[in-house]
Amino acid sequence: MKEVAIIGIGMTDWGELWEKSLRDISVEAALKCLDDAGVSKVDAITIGCMSGGLFNAQEHLGSLVADYLGQRFVPATRVESACASGGLAVKTAYMEVASGLAEYALAIGVEKMTDVDGNEATYALATAADQDYEAFHGITFPGLYAMMAKAHMKKYGTTLEQLSQVTVKNHDNGSLNPHAQFPCKFTLEQVMNSTMVADPLRLLHCSPITDGGAAVLLAPVEIAKKLNKPYAVITGIGHATDTIALAQRKDILKLEVVEQAAQRALKMAGKTIKDVSFAEVHDCFTIAEIMVMEAIGLVEPGKAGPAVMDGLTALTGKFPINPSGGLKSKGHPVGATGVAQVVEAVAQLRGEAGKRQVKNARIAMTQNMGGSGGSSIIHILEARS
Amino acid sequence: MKEVAIIGIGMTDWGELWEKSLRDISVEAALKCLDDAGVSKVDAITIGCMSGGLFNAQEHLGSLVADYLGQRFVPATRVESACASGGLAVKTAYMEVASGLAEYALAIGVEKMTDVDGNEATYALATAADQDYEAFHGITFPGLYAMMAKAHMKKYGTTLEQLSQVTVKNHDNGSLNPHAQFPCKFTLEQVMNSTMVADPLRLLHCSPITDGGAAVLLAPVEIAKKLNKPYAVITGIGHATDTIALAQRKDILKLEVVEQAAQRALKMAGKTIKDVSFAEVHDCFTIAEIMVMEAIGLVEPGKAGPAVMDGLTALTGKFPINPSGGLKSKGHPVGATGVAQVVEAVAQLRGEAGKRQVKNARIAMTQNMGGSGGSSIIHILEARS
């Protein structure tokens, strides 16, 4: 299989970007990425966006962005897998290059979520759940993840303190990220006493509603070699699906979709989880980060909570998770998240992550998830220079 | 580049499928395709669907369909390029195989448009136009295509009779297609006197609102060779974008996006339009078929209207267009259309199109379009046995 490199990265500031439209945000992220790569013309564009239709009454985003980016006539593909749309955009760009259809393939992730009010945003997000068997009956994602958290607490003794420590850690990291929506720190007490959303999940266990974009440029490794600067190579891709309805899983304590995706990605890269230096994972709710740690094989089932308390996943720990601040602190413009995870991974692998630099970052894992574990896309990235 | 074959095809009946849900339709098309291929397990699924969000409050369709199709854990990607989403699903499945990530890649196209009323459907479809500069101000697709038709009539002398003959021809063909939504014939007079929609376009110049699904199974050609039955090979893919706002085109009489896509597809296949036996094209409005004939190089600009009257594109003509009945007669469930075009092309190339069989069908072109020409995906398919 053709080796594919990432030769450019870019992202916008994340937050409530009232003054910028969906197309503005997409183009800004893409231009920053092209500037980083020193490339002006691409052969293919892929865009991860969960629901331009429901958030912005705008589908057909591929063509729109190609045009406004000055890349008219360039093939552009919008992909969607709920909150894993960004990871899917990177995978699809990989296929553009690996299939030989394109040399320079730009993957953009974007979501502009504040054009609608909170109820409408919750409705839009709930279309990632099973409409007929979940959303229609009134449950939305905080409720679904709350059930997973309750079950995890009951079976493994996972505590509110452990769920909260994930928040503290991710905000510690996010406070070092200039692009983060909420670069503020919290104490364990503040998190544990924040407003209840869906028992046991409180406000500060939930990722926010965010506007933002991110982009990465892929090319055959032969092109990257000529650039005379550090770059990253995608050596593993794992993509899997599961039932989108939580009620239809055999075991809601196991994110089998992540397990499958991680095994596939590591196998393709010829690595084990022990070889990986750090990971960006999908902490849409802090219980998700706990469960992902178990599903990727970092710790045994039930051991993630204590491991977080022990500092395993802190920036200075043995296996840093979410050095970017994660979805919790950096923000979660759903379609952009998977691409931004790759942006962070590449910045780390190039040694350009500033104050949040992970020491000896050589191999990264990015784990992006759709819904309550209905889909997941995992990339393994390796540093090259 | 790896040669990729199409080893299975399937589609549902098209129409107002009140008794079937979005997932039912997707699964029915996919199962028919897998039955046709004699394959039970696939490695990747791609789904073309324009707006599950706006039509059905259901995003995350990849995972939903993988699950209901009995393909849990299989990677599934939903792609969207407005009404060209189906063509994009086929291209993306091609990339799954050509990149080496998958052997058996299933492409499904689906749309369930009658879960909402006519106004809501028009609103949903208009999100394929530029929301900020077109749709928000009140114009929808019949109006956009009407402007193109008016301009074509003014510059080239194209007549209402010529626009109407496209309808007559496509319904003649569609009357032979058991899956068609409207398998009835019309006289030129009936078409010309039908209800006005957007001057000069009348009801019978417009494709309908449809529920339906279609699916094709792709695999490396080495696998197809072992099947001992006729199959088709994808030898050319052309994918292009243009401005989605009609007002931003240099010339609204030229579908440059189709011109670009056709040239790319033919170049990749090493063919010219003269080598092609027949085509399925995107006649969302009959003026579109006229303009596509010119854009793919079949006739000079302005000559398509007279060519239709002369029977060039009739089922028994030199270059049959839309033997299936096209969007006009077969129906237009937007995300399914591009896949169904490939289903028809393969059926023709295998010599299994029954009463609507094109004689000596060896090389087919399928042309799928998004919006008013904001995107187009063209495939060149060749018969093998």
Image (cartoon, coloured by chain):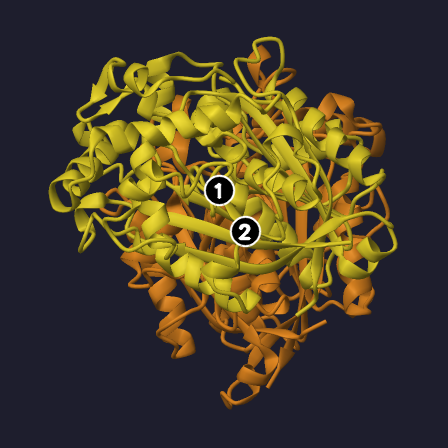
Chain colours: A yellow, B orange
Q: Check chain identity for marks 2 and 1: say if they share one.
A: yes
Which residue shows up at 17% across the image and 56% down it? A250
Answer with the quarter of the image where residue A54 lies: top left
- Looking at the image, residue B219 sits to the left or right of residue B381; the answer is left
Query: Where in the figure is residue A236, as x and y percent of width and height?
Result: 56, 60
Is any part of residue B74 visible from this angle? yes
Real-space Cα separation, disc 2 to disc 1, in angstroms: 8 Å
Secondary structure under the numbered disc 2 in the rendered image: loop
Q: Amino acid at mark 1?
A: Pro
Which residue shows up at 30% across the image and 45% down it? A304
Determine whether B364 is above or below B341 in the image: below
Which residue shows up at 31% across the image and 14% down it? A190
**Residue A195 or A192: which is nearer the viewer?**
A192
Is any part of residue A331 visible from this angle? no
Q: Amino acid at mark 2?
A: Ser
Determine whether A146 is above or below A155 in the image: above
Answer with the quarter of the image where residue A247 lies: top left
Parent chain of label 2 = A
Instruction: Read off the residue under disc 1.
Output: A320
Mark 2 and mark 1 in contact? Answer it, CB < 8 Å: yes
